Image (cartoon, rainbow, N blue to C red):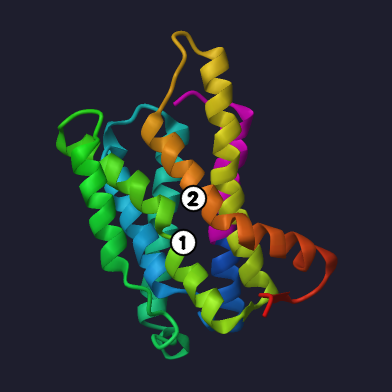
Amino acid sequence: MPLNLFRVLGDFSHLASIMILLHKMTQLKSCSGISFKSQALYFLVYITRYLDLFSTSSLYNIVFKILFIGTQGFIVYQMVNAYKPTNDPNLDTFRVQYLLGGAAVLAIVFPYKYTFLEIMWAFSIWLESVAILPQLFMLQRTGEAETITTHYLAALGAYRALYIPNWIYRYVTESPPHVDYIAITAGIIQTILYSDFFWIYYTRVMKGKKFKLPV
């Protein structure tokens, strides 16, 4: 994928979201308010998407792929070890098997090519589009969140939202026009899932108020 400003901003927003989460966990010595299921799903997303890690020729891609796999793996490791006592499974109850099953079916039925790498890539794209659902479901159950947690979610949501103008830019500037129907459809789904969160984030957190869902 060629580099352009929207993609670079999206990638750095993605990396920033992970750094914000790591900062929260390290500073507070806690993973309270963070869905382990969402974090585990994101780790699976990166593992299945970046199976071509050592076959890519772009240094930019290699560095970011290693960063995403490494940092996400570290987050999951910390949540099941050092910060496990602060993780509340009674709040993290979303049934992820439906997300895994749905992503697997779509990847098998609608891949670009019937090869292992292409199916795994499609699986990762579909899974990423819904991987945030356990976290959003946890927010729904608690009704509120720490400000730093909302910053993490905002940066994560902005990453995918920035990929929408990236796709438009590629369609306009590349010849022949590039259209990735799987990534575009999944990205739109992911952005829609964030819509309510973004509105509350903008109307409350950006104005210095605590993030709280309307009753």
Position of the N terminus by quadrant: top left
Q: What residue type is labelled 2?
A: Gln
Residue 130 higher or lower than 136, as above or below: above
**Residue 120 falls in which quadrant of the image?**
top left
CB under 8 Å between discs 2 and 1: yes
Q: In this view, does 87 lie to the left or right of 45?
A: right
In reply to whether residue 214 is colored magenta, the answer given is no
What residue do we see at 35% from left, 80% from top?
Answer: 80
User: What number is the disc on residue 97?
Assistant: none
Looking at the image, which is closer to me, 7 or 106?
Answer: 106
What residue do we see at 29% from left, 40% from top?
Answer: 122
Residue 59 higher or lower than 196, as above or below: above
Q: Residues within 10 Å of mark 2 (few under 14, many from 20)?
A: many
Q: In this view, does 194 lie to the left or right of 64?
A: right
Q: Is mark 1 on a helix, strand or loop?
A: loop
Position of the C terminus by quadrant: bottom right
What residue do we see at 40% from left, 52% from top?
Answer: 128
Give the percent coordinates (x, y) of residue 3. 53, 26
Query: Which of the two discs, 2 and 1, labels the residue nearer the N terminus?
Result: 1
Q: Which residue lies furthest to the right in this view?
A: 207
User: What number is the disc on residue 132?
Assistant: 1
Give the percent coordinates (x, y) of residue 14. 54, 50
User: What number is the disc on residue 190?
Assistant: 2
In reply to whether residue 3 is colored magenta, the answer given is yes
**Residue 83 falls in which quadrant of the image?**
bottom left
Give the percent coordinates (x, y) of residue 107. 24, 43
Residue 2 higher or lower than 34, as above or below: above
First to last magenta residue range = 1-18
Q: What residue type is labelled 1?
A: Ile
Looking at the image, which is closer to me, 144 or 148?
Answer: 144
Predominant secondary structure, magenta span: helix
